[in-house]
Structure formats: structure tokens, C-alpha cells
Amino acid sequence: MSIQSIATGRARPWLLPAGWLLVTAVVANQPGLGLDAFWTRQIVLVCLSALLVSGLNLSLGWAGELNMGLPAMYAVGAYLTAYVSSKVFNDLAVCLVLSAAAAIVVGLLAGVPGLRLGGWMLAVCTFLLVGLIPVTLQVIPTSILGGQSGFVGIPRPQLFGHPLREEAFYAVVVVVTALWFALYRNAVQSPFGNSLLVLQHGPVLAPSLGLSRYRLKLITYAFASVPIGVAGSLFAYNDRFVAPESLGLNLILLTLVALIIAGRRSIYAIFVGVVVVQYLNNLSTEFDEWSDVAFGAFLIIGGLAFGGGIAGIARRIARRFIPATTANAAAGAVPHLAGADLRLDAVRKTFGGVHAVAEVSLLARAGQITALIGPNGSGKTTTLNLISGLQRPTAGRILLGDRDLTRLPAIQVARCGVARTFQTPAIPIELTVLDAVAAGRIQRRPISLLSAVLRSPKYRRVVRENREAAAQWLAVVGLSPVAGEPAAAMALGTRRMIELARALCADPSLLLLDEVASGLDRDEVEELATVLRKVRDAGATIVLVEHNFSLVQSLADYVVVLAEGAVLTDGDPRTIAEHPEVLERFLGTGAGVSGTTLQEGRRA
Amino acid sequence: MSTAVFAGLSTGAIYTLIAIGYNVTLTSAGVLNFAYANTLVLGGFIALSATGWGLPLPLILLTCAAICTLVSVGVERAAIRFLPSGGHAELITTLGAGTAITAITVLIWGPDPQRLALYEQHPIDLLGGRVVPNNLVLIALPVVFGVGLHLLIRGTRFGLTSRAQAFDREATMLRGVNVRWLSIGAFAITGAFAGLVGPFVLVSTAASPWLAITIALKGFVVLALGGLGSQLGTVIAGFLLGLVESLVALWIGPFYGDYSVFVVFVLVLLLRPQGLFGSRSLRLV
């Protein structure tokens, strides 16, 4: 299979939309199915809950933040629709749009401050919103929203001036839900969704790929408010009565339970989760008192095992029967990389009173490999962190070409063309090898959520180009055969190569490699050296932190030796290998042995 | 005015008592225990039954503390012990535990608010305002327990290992500290605490099983305001929040108290994310 065919992905791309359209058409046809009032209501409720669960899944599953404000957004959608339809202008489409917009505003009210800290701060901040619902209903005069006793007198829905009969409204609910799920699926199965998976890997990886955690979470959070507001609006029209009792903590509990059954980051399985919860809920009216105990117990069990859910099981089965795409491309050509000289000028970093980097000045030239060596604790990794902006230097200057990187945060440094690998490979879960590599390019060729959702021509072009670039780098590092496999499950050596390919996929001018050869076997080290030579010849600046001196000797054009946070000496590898102090202190008498065995225990 | 200040201080005291409980598990076990407020309310209801049996006050409190300790340790075993590392799964599991505890409270004592009376309540005049004795007890409780727990965390081996654990769990384990026992210990302490103060809280409010949600929420706000890990900050922040809520309700209108809490919380998040008295380092835990 060629690079082209890896990059374009799935065969028969029309199959999924066509199938979804068919399912929607069948379900939306109420008279055709011969549904009575009970079943019509059940399906409407399933649709509404599915909208809620997808919203919760976007924030909890994809952005990794628990949003407890769901009832508040739902309430805003419901009450806005109730008010507008009965007192201003009765049109379903208008109310849906207004409700979605209002839900976003209310969501952001708690999201903007809460997401800065995330975790339970967001949970509390959004939960406070829920507490404000009954208070707000008491503050607003009863003549407007009906106060504690609820809003009555919502008219039958109209669409573009035509009153909707029951089966037509039912069809609208089904179609709106189906449409939202298509948008939701498009949003998460895209580079945007992939960047959310990168986000889940922790606070370090996303910024070093140039992705802003706060921005991504905020966008996802706003997007997640849309289905919740829409569901609120449809709920108001369906029941034609809104009461504050239906908007409490119970709503979030039921939604959480459904999400747990469906599985984190699920799409279609959400419907299964919702149906199960609805079934249980219908049962529980018979023994109402025990249902909360059961739900509580379920939350404990589900929370402990929160993971794949039904979606995860389905994925595991699918993987068994559908072989992953593999390819045997010829070794790929390396594109030109515009390297820039890296200059460190008396850079210093202190933690409290400890000088991690006492004073380091060095020059790494474009088109050369510069190796940083030294014993553990000599400040090599700290130096890399200072360059890539993960830590700020206490003093000194860092220049890349003409650009001053000294005080830039990691995101900005990454956007200046600095890519790096980590001592422990940072590979997000659930991504294929190809997508993990393409993640290096998400920032370089950004795609707006809107164009991802609409699958615009620009989106298709950018995604194809990014995947082609990723496929090409995979070929360079020799990983084309595993392009379709899950990346995080690979062996250590493979994950190091994936990380290297991801860094290269950003077309970096400066490549920072942190002990990229450790844990690799002899063949892999040899392959790595070949790749790095190609990259150097393509023009990039490479800075390599390495313990394996024989690799350094064969690879580096220039070596900087660090000791106790300062430059001990520098020069070409041969000079370094003969430098008496280096010999004595790090290399031992038999120069050329791996430095890894020396003073291993001192790493903090 | 004085009456409103007393009212504010005693609601503030309730919030503080909740926040103190959260703080203990947060510093010692590294998890936030949503179910704590539910346990506290359960404690109040046990007192309701215990007064029915005609027990003297110390015995009532002892019974509540004992049962709540068991419940709290049960929460730790069920909802925390097998947590996967990373993520905020404890938010979900302890929320589940809390839901179950409240549901069981409803099963045993019914859903309707009841009156709990531990001792005679005659309002007394004090500093130009009227206040019931229980509110004075409530105001004293967080001060006493706050200082006590502060000393426990600062001065004992349990406190030292707890703080070490919160700072770096792995390194603490490698030092030979049994962090699981630390976690159970923290939950047992908060359980006993919940049982001791729960009755006083429920005397002041109506004894409703659903009270837990409201006070849990305000407790979180106090925790964030005071700063994670700071018991003294929690005490000060709790009283402040109670005062703000009570005075806003007095001056602007009875329904705006909750709004003022939200506004204060958002402002603190934006301007001083580490809390008024918190240390930055714990924030990353």
C-alpha cells in the first residue's frame, strides 16, 4: 500500500453517512413505525437524553473536565423557549438557535473562571450555577417565568409559520438529534478531537506541540453547551410545561450514569447507555426509594471502571475482525527543513537555592547535530526544558536565529519551530500511530472546529496533507507497517520513534531530543542514527541529550559537556573523547562505553 | 444588624465545618470527598433517633461519631481504595457514595424535614442582637476544631506524613509510609468529625436529608476561598462567606445571598486562584 492510501484512510467513505441517513429516516417516520403515544414519548426522551449525554461526554470524556452545570444550561434552553414561544414569537428553529446560544453564554459564565484551574474547581463552579436555578426563578417575577410552580401554557411548536402536528414534531426531534450526532462525530473524529486526546496526556505535552490547553477546553466546553441548550428547548416544546423540580441534581446523576454505561468518548453507544438508564428509570418509579441507592452504587462502580463502557467493548470486538491498515512504503524522502542557529547566552536556572543550571552558553548551528553530555544532575534536561519554554530561565538569553525565546511560554516556543521528544515518550492514548505523528502538525496547519464539523473542502485538504506528511515521516523512521495500530500500545523503542516522527512532522527548525536512544536495541540505535543524519542533512538544527557516548561520537558534529550546571568543555567528538578531565570524570578508562551505567542513582 | 451578623456567622460556621472535613481528606489522602457533607447530615439524623432513645448528650454525640466513622471508612473502602490513578474519578465515585448515603437517610428517616432538639433553645440578647445558644456553639465549633486540626496537621507524625503524601505520594511510599492507612485514617477522622458536628448543624437548620447538597456546595466555595490545605484560612473564609451572604440578603434582598456566593467564588478564581490563604504548591495535587 502506498503513502497515498495510508493517508486517505477508510475505504467507502459514503457508507457511514448513508447508513446514518437511513436510520434517521426510518426512526423519524412515526406513522410508518406505528408507534403509540407511549413509545413516541419514550423515543423523544431517549433523543433528549442522548443530546445531554453527548454534551457531558464532550466536556468529561474529551476535555477531561466534569461539568456539573448541565441542569443550568438545560434550564436556560427550556425557559427561554417557553418564554419566547409563548410571549414573543413561536418558531421552533428560532427557539433552538436562541437556546443553544443562551446555553453557551451560561456555560461560559462558569467555564471561563472554572476552566482556568480545572478539576473540581470547575465542578464546583458549574455546580453553583445549578444552585442558582431555584433562586433565579424566585427573583424573576412569577408573571414572566412562573416561579417555583413552573411555566405553563407553552404553545404547540410552529416551524416557519406552519403549526407542527405531533408526528411532525417527533420527526423534528429525531432529525435534530441525528444531525447533532453527525456534527458531534465529525468534531471528535478529526484533528480537533485528536488534539483533545493530546490534552488528556497531561499538562506538558499539549503546550510543547503548540496547543493551548485553556483555549481547547474552552472551545470544547462551549461546543458541549449546544446540545444541552437544544435539548432544553425541545424538552419545553415536548412537555409544554417546565418545572424547576426536573432541573436538579438528579438530571446530572442520570446523565452521568448513562455516560458511564456508554463509555468515555463514545459516540453511537450513547444511545445504548441512554436506553438502559431510561429503562431503569421507568422501572424505578415502582420502587422509587431504592433507585437513588442503586444509582449511587452504580456511580461508584462506574467511576472506578470509567473507561470504555459499551463503546470500548464494541471497539475491541471491531479490532479483532477488521484488520488495521498496514503499508510497506519505501524509505521516504526527507523534505527540506529550515534550520536556525540556537544560541544560549549565560543561561541560568535556580530552584530555590539550587543551581540546576549555573551558567550555560552554547551555540548549536543549523545543519549540525550538537550533543549535550554530562552525568546525571548536570543540567542537561533542564537546559532542554529552558529552551523549549517548559521552564523559565532565571537569567541569560536564548536565541533561535533572530528570535528571542528567553521568556516565551512553551506554546509560543513550539510555534517558533521548536519540536522536542521526552525522556519518557509522551504518546496520547487512543490515537493510531499515524494520527499520533500527525498530531505534531495540528498547530502548524490549524483547523477550526467549524470546518471540522462541516467537513469543509479546506478541512479535507489540510487533513490529507497532514496525514501525507505524517505517512512520509513514518516511512522515514520505518514505521509504515504499523501506521494503523494504536500508538500507545507500542513497545518502548517504537514509541520513541513515533515521538521522533511526531517532532519531525512539525517541520521543525530546531529539534530537541532528550535521551532518544535510551532503551533502544542495537539495530534501533543504528536506524535512529541514520534518520538523524538525514534530518541534519535536510538542514535542521538538532540538539541531542545523550548518555550513549559511542552514539554521540558517531553522530554529533559538536559536543558540549556539562558538569554541575556549567559547561565543562566543548569541541568536536574526537577532542572530547581525548579530553583528560572528561575521560576521568565521565567516560572511565575505556572510553566509548555507555555513560548510562555511571552514577545512575543520582537522578532526582 | 447584630442579629444578621450572628446569623451570618453561624451559617458561615456550618460552611466552615463542611470545608474543614474536605480539607482533611484533601491534605491527607489527596482526594476530595464529596460524600462528607452527606455523612455529616446522616450524623444529625442519627442524633434524631438517639434523642428518641433518651440518651444523654455526650452519649448521643459518641454514637453519631462512631457510626459516621464507620460510614466514612466504608466510603474510603468503596469509592477511593480502588481508584485508578490520575483523572478526577473520585469526583464521580464520592458523588455516588454521597447519593447513596442520602438515599439511605431518606429510606430510614423519610424525605420530610424534621426538628432536632438537643437541648433547650431560648434566644438570648447579646451585643445588641438576638441569638440562640446553639448558634453560639456552632460559631465556636469551627474555631476549636480548626485550631485542633491545624495542630494535628502541623504537630503530629500523622500530619507530617500526610503533608508529605500530598506533596509527593510516591516518594512518601518509598520512605516506608503506608499511604493507604493514611487515607483510611483521614476518612476516619473526618467521619468522627462529621458525627460530632452534624447534630449541631441540624439543630440550627431543619433536619432535611437534602440539606447535604446545599451545604456541600458552600463548603467547596469556602475551601477554594480559604485555600487548599489551610485549616485556618478555611475558618476565616467560612465566616467571611457567611457574613457576606447574610448581609447581602439583609441589604439587597433575601434571594441575592446565593448570587453573592457565586460572584465571590468567581472573583477569587480569577484574581487569586490559590485562595485567600492557600499555598500554591498544593494546587497541583
Image (spheres, rainbow, N blue to C red):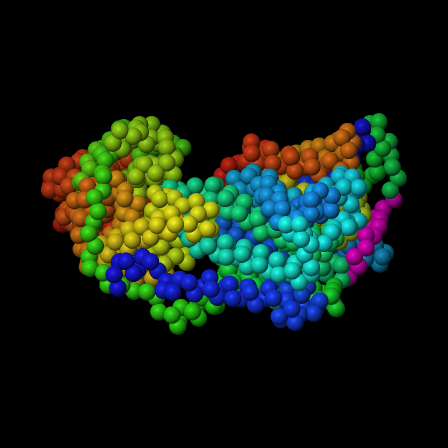
Compared with B101, A372 (above or below) is: above
Q: Position of residue A221 (x, y in %)?
A: 53, 46
Magenta-colored span: B108-120
Where, quadrant-wise, is the C terminus of chain A in this rendering?
A: top left
Is B133 on the left or on the right of A273, as rendered?
right
Q: Write the residue at 78% across / 39% down.
A: A141
Residue drawn 63% across and 50% down?
Answer: A160
> Which residue shows up at 21% across the image and 47% down it?
A335
Residue A42 position by quadrant: bottom right
> Within the magenta stretch, is there residue A275?
no
Residue A418 appears in view? yes
Measured from the top left, where is residue A548 in percent x and y?
21, 49
Residue at point 27% right, 47% down?
A504
Q: Nearer the viewer, residue B119 or B272?
A: B272
Give residue A481's position: percent from left, percent from top. Answer: 27, 63
Q: Is residue B186 left or right of residue B86?
A: right
* A558 on left or right of A151: left
Quadrant occupied by the N terminus of chain A: bottom left
Q: Is residue A549 left or right of residue A383?
A: left
Quarter of the image holding residue B248? top right
Where is residue A145 drawn, in percent x and y?
A: 75, 44
Tell which of A24 and A512 is nearer to you: A24
Q: Is residue B115 magenta?
A: yes
Tell me if I can see residue A422 in this picture.
no
Of residues B274 and A148, the one nearer the viewer is: A148
Magenta-highlighted stretch: main secondary structure?
loop
Tally the marks: 0
